[in-house]
């Protein structure tokens, strides 16, 4: 059944111009870049949530620079993916206002390297030149040829820039959250125990005072969000890997974009990308 469905999808993607597979994967990559932005934004988001728990913590300026710069990188990637789709459709392409400023913000990401900054800048320059270009198949090949490697550098670089940092942020948030609620529950004279997280899997809190029971519900709700986002970082990393694989397939097949075997591979990669992005969206949206 799955093979028949895959064959049907490939047949549909090949369409009349046989560039349907390129349009399809470009659309999926565009959607992915939007959801990647939610993950990057949580670097600053987690820091701000920690400050609401403990106002004595330092400011979140570095975290905000990271989130803003990642938003810029995602904006450029999204524009590149849309450009691929426009070229495959032979339709007009326009640049969204603010993309130049977004590109500049990438250099402010803590830990970003020169190659990653140059890759984003190069992609922006390539995209900017498309405003007056005629969007057709040879333009598509040029986009893949000149933009494929920089796009892959940005995609793979985001894994290093986001996953370790956000993992640390969420772990720190979890520690702050647990300490705060343990203190509040102790003030209610409720027996918290050594590990407050066990309250979320048992019935112990049913014996608490009214305020203590409500505090436990709120603690467990927030803890579940943190744990869900931490777990979804693996899906985020896998979605970046799938995107890199798709871009590599386009690069290696840029002179054979209409073949059925490419459509088959891109459909498979796109399906996997959708699955990972769905998990990311549920955790971070």
Image (tube, rainbow, N blue to C red):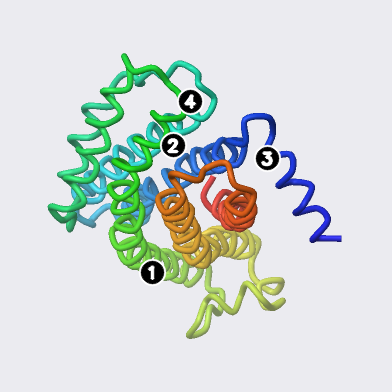
Seen from the viewer's position, the closer of residues 223 and 258 is 258
State the residue position of label 2. 81
Task: Mark 4 or mark 2: name the one nearer the start of the chain.
Answer: 2
Disc 2 is placed on an element classified as helix
Q: CA distance from mark 4 to mark 2?
A: 9 Å
Q: Are marks 4 and 3 in contact (CB under 8 Å)?
A: no
Residue 38: horizontal and vertical position, in percent? 45, 45
The mark found on residue 100 in the picture is none
Q: Residues within 10 Å of mark 1 (few under 14, many from 20)?
A: some
* Residue that sits furthest to the right in the current view: 1
Q: Is residue 42 above or below residue 190?
A: above
Q: Examine the rendering and report whether any part of residue 275 can be seen.
A: no
Disc 1 is placed on an element classified as helix
Seen from the viewer's position, the closer of residues 60 and 219 is 60
State the residue position of label 3. 13
Quarter of the image with the C terminus is top right
Task: Mark 3 or mark 2: name the one nearer the start of the chain.
Answer: 3
Residue 208: horizontal and vertical position, in percent? 64, 71
| Residue at image location 17% in from the left, 45% down from the top | 118
| Residue at image location 42% in from the left, 69% down from the top | 183
Q: Examine the rendering and report whether any part of residue 32 can be seen.
A: yes
């Amino acid at each position: 059944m799955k093979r028949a469905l895959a064959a049907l999808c490939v047949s549909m993607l090949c369409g009349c111009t046989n560039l349907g597979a390129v349009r399809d994967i470009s659309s999926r990559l565009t959607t992915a870049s939007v959801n990647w932005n939610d993950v990057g934004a949580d670097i600053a988001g987690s820091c701000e949530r920690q400050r609401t728990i403990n106002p004595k913590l330092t400011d979140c300026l570095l975290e905000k620079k990271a989130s803003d710069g990642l938003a810029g990188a995602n904006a450029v990637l999204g524009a590149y993916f849309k450009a691929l789709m426009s070229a495959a459709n032979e339709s007009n392409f326009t640049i969204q206002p603010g993309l130049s400023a977004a590109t500049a913000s990438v250099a402010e990401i803590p830990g970003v390297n020169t190659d990653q900054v140059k890759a984003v800048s190069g992609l922006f320059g390539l995209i900017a030149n498309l405003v007056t270009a005629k969007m057709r198949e040879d333009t598509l090949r040029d986009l893949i040829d000149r933009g494929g490697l920089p796009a892959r550098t940005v995609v793979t670089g985001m894994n290093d820039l986001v996953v370790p940092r956000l993992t640390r942020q969420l772990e720190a948030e979890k520690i702050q959250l647990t300490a705060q609620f343990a203190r509040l529950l102790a003030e209610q004279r409720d027996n918290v125990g050594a590990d407050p997280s066990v309250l979320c899997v048992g019935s112990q809190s049913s014996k608490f005072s009214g305020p203590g029971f409500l505090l436990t519900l709120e603690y467990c709700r927030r803890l579940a969000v943190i744990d869900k986002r931490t777990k979804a970082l693996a899906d985020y990393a896998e979605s970046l890997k799938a995107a890199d694989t798709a871009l590599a397939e386009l690069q290696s097949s840029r002179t054979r974009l209409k073949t059925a075997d490419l459509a088959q591979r891109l459909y498979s990669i796109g399906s996997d990308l959708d699955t990972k992005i769905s998990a990311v969206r549920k955790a971070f949206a």
